[in-house]
Image: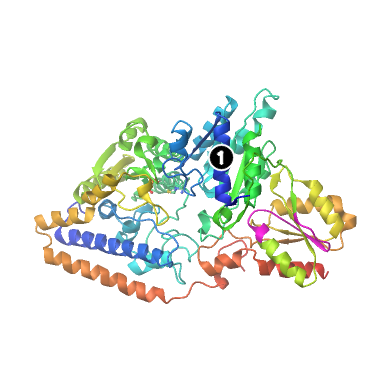
Amino acid sequence: MTNELNKSRLKKMFRTMLISRALDERVWILNRQGKAAIAASAQGHEASQVACIEALDPSLDHFLIYYRQFTVTLALGTTPEEQLRTFLAKDGEIMSGARQFPLHGSHPRVDLFSFSNVVGTQLPQAVGVALADKMRDSNAVTVVFFGDGAASQGDCHEAMNFASIHSLPVIFFCENNGYAISVPLSKQMAVENISSRAAGYGMPGVLVDGTDIFDVFEATSEAANRARRGEGPTLIESTVERLLPHTTDDDHSKYRRKDDIEGLSRMDPLPITAEKLVSINVLSKSDIQMMEKEAKLIVDDATEKIGNEPYPGVETMLLHSDLEF
Amino acid sequence: MPIVSVIEAVRDTIRSEMKQNPSVFILGEDIGARGGVFLATDGFVELFGPERVIDTPLAESSICGIAIGSAVNGMRPIAEIQFADFVWPAVNQIVGEASKIRYGTYGKKICPMTIRIPYGGGVRGGLYHSQSIEVIFSHTPGLKVVAPATAYDASGLLRSAIRDDDPVIFLEHKKTYRLVKGEVPSDDYTIPLGKAEIKREGEDLTVITYGLMLHYVLQSAVECEKLGISVEVVDLRTLRPIDRETIVKSVSKTGRALIVQEDTAAVSISSEVSAIISEECFFDLDAPIMRLTPLEIPPMPFSPIQESEYLPSKQKITSAVSKLSSI
Ligand SMILES: Cc1ncc(C[n+]2csc(CCOP(=O)(O)OP(=O)(O)O)c2C)c(N)n1
């Protein structure tokens, strides 16, 4: 990957953000209609996720994600249809065979590591992935995503410590949206920034504005270069807002102040990114309108198609289990 | 008597224990302003303040380790693990540590804490919001493990758990929270830990079960009655210490035993119950012991058809009962 964000790359990134948003909105509707059992939203995280992936090489690098990473999976090259199917748990679901929650499992084309719902477990596993690369002189970088909540787990500390001791090619990418479900940052840690912890492990800690694709892209590129040069891990803290409640099961008006919720749209990365791209003449306002329409169409088509598909029957239940015959 | 749901029974009991005893406090993820993800502690932070209702960082090992420390130092913490599937980071503290304090200090220290854990499936929870985790704790000397199925039992057993001087793992089946309702007296009653209950008397066959499955077993028993089979139902209620006496008495009477559980079979509660019956009822048995459990695959598929195939159901129980009674 070159470190130049040219016009076509910027356009592609924005398109992914739009599709992610349209899909995200759709799965919440499908949840309210009783068709999708659960959804966590990436709304607010789109710029951060798309720019991080743009700085990496999906054909070489490893990605350990968590449940709020709709935009990451799309940016890596999975299709909207594949993603939607994970929410509806329909037959042919490509990630886990509809055995797991949305987005969980792995993918046949993209190196998405299987991820657990147990928050934090992905962090030491990512370090192991990077260790295997180092042992075999691979040039790959491992990126592990986690929330501010996950940063409290012992696994997080243990992972960062080991990665730094062994100068492993890991990017610890924390999407700090200020809440672990209802628990605000001030009750999760006595410091202001997770990135400041990096000093305690002897690695660089970088704080970026997660609504700024340029900021996130630059920090991730630098961390990736450093990792590929054999200089070890970096902790990136990308600050974002979670625009919606934790999941479709949550109601954030119980624990967020009214004015806080009303102010969230100011941190919406879509209009922020659109405005930036218009101001540097990458896109016109009418381009954006057309792209929005296209995103809705893609999502409409996928919804219609998948809506009529059957659920997996019982015949595949035992595949890949101890009882497989 | 007021009719309340299981979650209301849990909530009312914690509230009343906190009112009566200032050493009782609660800690866990999202238990404050959010009131817990299942609303077990709804309104508590307003009532008792953030010193006794502690919203913790997302870190289960510390939740349980801190509960242990405060319990040994004279408090009576109630820790909430948000979902059973997330208790694993805390197993070191619970199984490795809490269980050994009284024995290991030759009785000089005790660890009076309760760990509440919503568990079980049938709620479209997939592999990480459906797990049954009772076996790990039920295997461990030094722990008590409770798994009530009704609102009445939940309240009486939780009160006993909080007042008990040993660490108690209190398992609440998620699907029973709102689905199961019953009469709960408003007085301060307790139900002793370690005592099973006959939930239905019968003559031909004993079904031993616990948790959500109790309700399916009771529904099936009504159906079996119509088929001419009289089923006695034992609700274990406490999984450790297990009530050998009640199991043995019932199976000795009926001569046939079916064990129904939501957990997978290998090295499980049903294995233990089965061993007890073989040890103590061998000469009273008219048929081999039978178990009805899910398939030996990770619990449980997210997709709806596979999820219902996975779980024991009223129909499956009825056909198991019919089969066993015809042997
Ligand atoms: C070990 C563990 N404990 C608790 C949970 C329940 N839970 C799911 S997400 C979540 C909050 C996570 O917050 P954060 O890491 O900040 O990510 P965010 O959802 O804000 O993106 C909690 C408590 C879990 N999944 N795993």
| On screen, residue B123 above or below A308 | above
> Going by the picture, which residue comes out furthest to the right?
B283
The chain letter for the residue carrying disc 1 is B
Viewer-proximal residue, B245 or B263?
B245
Residue tagged by mark 1? B14
Range shown magenta? B199-215
Q: Amino acid at mark 1?
A: Ile
Viewer-proximal residue, B295 or A106?
B295
Name the image quarter holding the C terminus of chain A.
Answer: bottom right
Image x and y of residue A292, in percent: 21, 66
Does residue B166 belong to the magenta stretch? no
Name the image quarter holding the N terminus of chain A.
Answer: bottom left
Q: Quadrant of residue A186?
A: top left
How was the colour assigned to the protein in this rendering?
rainbow
Please rate how many residues cluster around mark 1, counting C-alpha atoms within 10 Å: few if below 14, some from 14 to 19, many from 20. Answer: many
Residue A230 at least partly seen: yes
Q: Residue at x 49, y 72 (%)?
A: A311
Viewer-proximal residue, A159 or B225?
B225
Residue A240 at least partly seen: no
* Image-based side of B45 in relation to B191, left or right: left
Dot 1 lies on which element?
helix
Image x and y of residue A210, in percent: 25, 47
